[in-house]
Amino acid sequence: MKHTRIKDLLNSTKTLQEVNAKGWVRTFRNNQFIALNDGSTIHNIQCVVDFENTPEETLKRITTGAAVSVTGNLVESQGAGQKYEIQVVKLEILGDSDAEKFPMQPKKHSLEFLRENAHLRVRTNAFGAIMRVRSVLSFAVHNYFQEKGFVYVNTPIITGSDAEGAGEMFKVTALPFDNTPRTEDGKIDYKKDFFGKETNLTVSGQLEGETFAMALGQIYTFGPTFRAENSNTSRHLAEFWMIEPEVAFNDLNDNMDLAEDFIQYVIKYTIDKCQDDLKFLESRLTEEEKQKPQAERSEMALLEKLNFVLENNFKRVSYTEAIDILRDCAPNKKKKFNYIINEWGADLQSEHERYLVEKHFKCPVILFDYPANIKAFYMRLNEDGKTVRAMDILFPGIGEIVGGSQREERFDVLVEKMKALGIDEEELWWYLDTRRFGSAVHSGFGLGFERLVLFVTGMTNIRDVIPFPRTPMNAEF
């Protein structure tokens, strides 16, 4: 008999004579009540076993984590909190689970313990909910751009360029480590490597994306990116997913409009599709907040915070105005910030970004026109010669969630900026060609997908919103 997903059984409009459900046992009470979950929903279905007519040996095998198949009648439940239950006629153990060894017991586990068991943590309510939300958010990203006629582009994962100019990249090589070929001056001879040159894992698909935007008009990438930063923080991963749209003929204002519209769309889509999971994550967050001192608690519940982003226009503020606000604010004057803002030109930290969003404006904020010397070479220089057409979107609880800019479309200006930063023109000859042949104003942004998932789920550590986190000294699983 073909099995039916538990989500569909619970949403059924009528009782059915006979159904089959398969899943994993969450709990087994009184030798009679199985709470069964198959991952299709946050909710379990109760399966009532006729224990008097079930062999003792079978009952002993119904343990937390075991995979079972139950066949029986779907009936209206007598218990509170559930619409239907299955009166079991036939029960089959598909896979045993040793109750004493299975790590995911029906109790509260620390997030650190769950990270150590990332291969099994998705069997808990919280991580099942997070991963379903992540899946829906991912679909919403594609849906948004496809509906607007964007072309999806797969940019290279192995690259010879460093889009950010950051330098913290993972090297890709096929050279032997125990006998690495060297040049006459003792340097590694990359000409003998697989690609004949030095290559790395990509930090961004932006530069390649720009070349496609200058032919296809509007494109987006959505793929893995890598940073070899030794950052053991709750906001950083060594491997994460990036969403990067790039649009020909868009200036910075168009770029801000696109980013705001996109974020509001994907959040609304996810709220509409993931009600049960988000309600569960909201109650989980509320319980977690109770452990914090009053001053550190969030002013809004999770769904309230998500709707707040939907219902409020993002406040657009220049970097210069933001610096004035921060320099004069109480935490700065009382030296409560870890990084004190003294002068224009400072690189804003997460604490500054969150102050602007959570304390000062109390809404999402788009900062724009940053100092040129703290931003990447490809951002368009303003007429003042000291700022660039950059933008960052700041969210409550997270800080920066989007970084973007109007790109420098003027060949001469771009070359001068590259020279000043010591960027090799020959390495990026193909990128400069887009300014040689039919250059035009264009803009784009990058959004770290995990930071978006972090915001939507209410989780506080980025390692908890990706299936298998890659962080310094950790590449388990």
Image: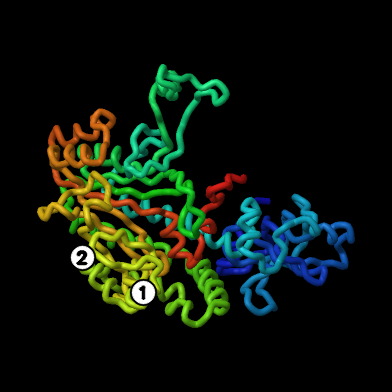
Going 42% across and 44% down the picture, which residue do you hit?
Answer: 225
Q: Quadrant of the C terminus?
A: top right
Residue 92 visible? The answer is no
Q: Residue furthest top?
A: 184
Q: Is residue 378 left or right of residue 310?
A: left
For marks 2 and 1, give the one nearer the viewer: 2
Q: Nearer the viewer, residue 268 or 10?
A: 268
Q: Residue furthest bottom?
A: 294
In terms of image quadrants, where is residue 427?
top left
x then y, percent, for residue 140:
39, 56
Task: Report helix, strand or loop for mark 1.
Answer: helix
Residue 223 visible? The answer is yes
To which residue does mark 1 refer?
A: 358
Q: Residues within 10 Å of mark 2 (few under 14, many from 20)?
A: some
Q: Say what amino acid the circle numbered 1 marks.
A: Glu
x then y, percent, for residue 34:
74, 66
Q: Say what amino acid the circle numbered 2 marks.
A: Thr
To which residue does mark 2 refer?
A: 320
For residue 473, above or below residue 391: above
For residue 291, above or below residue 165: below
